[in-house]
Amino acid sequence: MKVADKNRAQDLSALARLRDRLRKLYHGRTPAAFRFQLAAVVIDLAIIAFFIATPVIQKSSSFLWLDYSVAALVAADMIARLLASNDMLRLMKQPASWIDGFILLTLLMPAALANLGFLRILRLWSLSRSGALWRFFEMRGFRRWREASRAVINFLTFLFVITGFVYTFFFRTVGGLESYVDALYFTVATVTTTGFGDIVLPGVAGKLTAIATMIIGISLFVRLAQALFRPTKVFFPCPQCGLQRHEPDAVHCKACGHVLNIPDDGD
């Protein structure tokens, strides 16, 4: 009995050490943690590139091997983030976790969920909510571009989601790179309300798709323009009231008057 208790204690100790190590890697600010977080971002971008290219390469002989390899990476990242979290239940309730779970499901069942594969690009939106990505920008002095970068990522996510939807439900019967480019061309022309009319989606479903794309696309364009052209502000949570956006040279919080100590971009 004592031996079993000792083994259990050793297992718990090993798990605690693993969680502490992962917590330092995912949330730390040491050089080792920074290298790990940068590598994780690069891997995420490679996975997103795979998702974008999926319609073109899904008929190749190596596609399933790549698909399940990406599934293993996504699953490992999800488990590691759970172990690194101080509140696993709270993390599991976040939309980004739901999106990652759905993406993992489509990767594990690529044939059964083929019509929903275009939603995998939501991983890009999930990445934009990653603290590691913005810590990298802040350490390189690009803190002021955080909001504009998020607006760009939101727009690109929408663009590729709609492109994937249009390709899946209107162009997939033809297949190939040319059909995917046609879907992307239609999406860009519709989002920008250019409407050349040389590629038109058939039927009522096509018209409704174009309408929804234009409405949402215009909204994202306005949001992107606001982020790019309105007066630049920095993200720095006020210790007293929590207000996050301030002028770069602000000394006091405009909401509560608390003294701020906003670091320069060069720090």
Image (cartoon, rainbow, N blue to C red):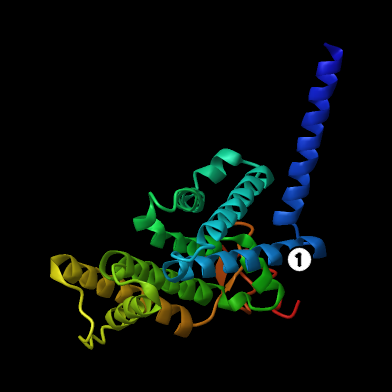
In the rendered structure, the answer to whether residue 69 lies left or right of residue 39 reads left
Q: Residue at x 37, y 75 (%)?
A: 180
SS for tag 1? helix
In front of the other: 237 or 169: 169
Q: Position of residue 13 (x, y in %)?
A: 81, 33
Closer to the camera in the image, 230 or 128: 128
For the residue carrying disc 1, how many other residues have a C-alpha within 10 Å: few (<14), some (14-19), or many (20+)?
A: some
Is residue 247 visible to the viewer in this orientation of the structure?
no
Residue 7 in the image: above or below residue 109: above
> Which percent across, then down, holds residue 176?
38, 74
| Most distant residue in the left direction | 204
- Identity of the amino acid at label 1? Arg
In depth, the one of 27 and 236 nearer the eye is 27
Q: Is residue 220 visible?
A: yes
Which quarter of the rendering shows the C terminus? bottom right
Residue 254 to residue 113: above or below: below
Residue 31, by quadrant, is bottom right
Q: Quadrant of residue 43?
A: bottom right
Is the residue 143 above or below the residue 26 in the image? below
Left-right relation of 73 to 181: right
Residue linked to disc 1: 35
Q: Is residue 76 above or below residue 6?
A: below
* Residue at image coords 34%, 57%: 115
Q: Which percent across, then down, holds residue 105?
A: 47, 48
Q: 26 left or right of 241?
A: right
Residue at 53% x, 81% y: name it. Answer: 232
Q: Quadrant of the N terminus?
A: top right
